Amino acid sequence: MGNIHIRAIDDTNEWIVRKIKLKPGQEKYIESVDECIKEASTYHQWRPVALYDEEDMIGFAMYGSFGPNKDTWIDRIMIDEKYQGQGLGRKAMRKLIEIVSEEYGVKVIYLSIIEENEVAFKLYKSIGFEFMNERDPNGELIFQYVMN
């Protein structure tokens, strides 16, 4: 356990990633994988990816870079219910930060969460994301991570 990596979503794994399930009640905090993949097919700046621990698919994430300032976002991350509570979300976030900062050559990464999502709030703060005292157009709290 602990060799977290990402893979593009393609014909070999899309059917599996679409089966990712959250714990009851969590679906109110994030769009479904189906909605994310549909959004990424419309907005090609989004990169939807499958999250793996060794060979086990453990979750899904989506990231991208937008606008004239090339603001870079880790917009979605979800860990399948059967892999939650094992520290894999934290490891996956750290891996995503590394990949995203390298891929886009950035030192600042953004994300947003629904205010009621206390678990995500605590996780992101503990990793080093700082709440910016701003909200996105949907009212979500905006956080930024600044690389050292």
Image (cartoon, rainbow, N blue to C red):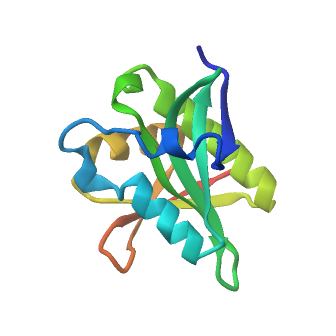
Closer to the camera in the image, 82 or 132? 82
Is 65 located above or below residue 137 in the figure?
above
Please state the horizontal and vertical placement of residue 89, each as a whole percent of the image: 47, 33
Specify the quadrant that holds the N terminus: top right
Please state the horizontal and vertical placement of residue 36, each as a whole percent of the image: 46, 61
> In the picture, residue 134 is in which quadrant?
bottom left
Task: Tell me, yes or no, if residue 148 can be seen here.
Answer: no
> In the picture, residue 25 is in which quadrant?
top left
**What is the tally of numbered marks visible in this picture?**
0
Closer to the camera in the image, 114 or 79? 79
Is 102 located above or below residue 114 in the figure?
above
Q: Residue at 67% of width from left, 21% of height from top? A: 3
In the image, taking residue 68 as reference, residue 51 lies left or right, namely: left
Task: Tell me, yes or no, if residue 84 can be seen here.
Answer: yes
Q: Residue at 51% of width from left, 43% of height from top? A: 15
Q: Residue at 43% of width from left, 53% of height from top? A: 33
- Looking at the image, the residue that sits furthest to the left is 25
Is 56 located above or below residue 111 in the figure?
above
- Looking at the image, the residue that sits furthest to the bottom is 68
Please state the horizontal and vertical placement of residue 79, each as a whole percent of the image: 43, 36
Closer to the camera in the image, 145 or 96? 96
In the image, taking residue 15 as reference, residue 96 lies left or right, namely: right
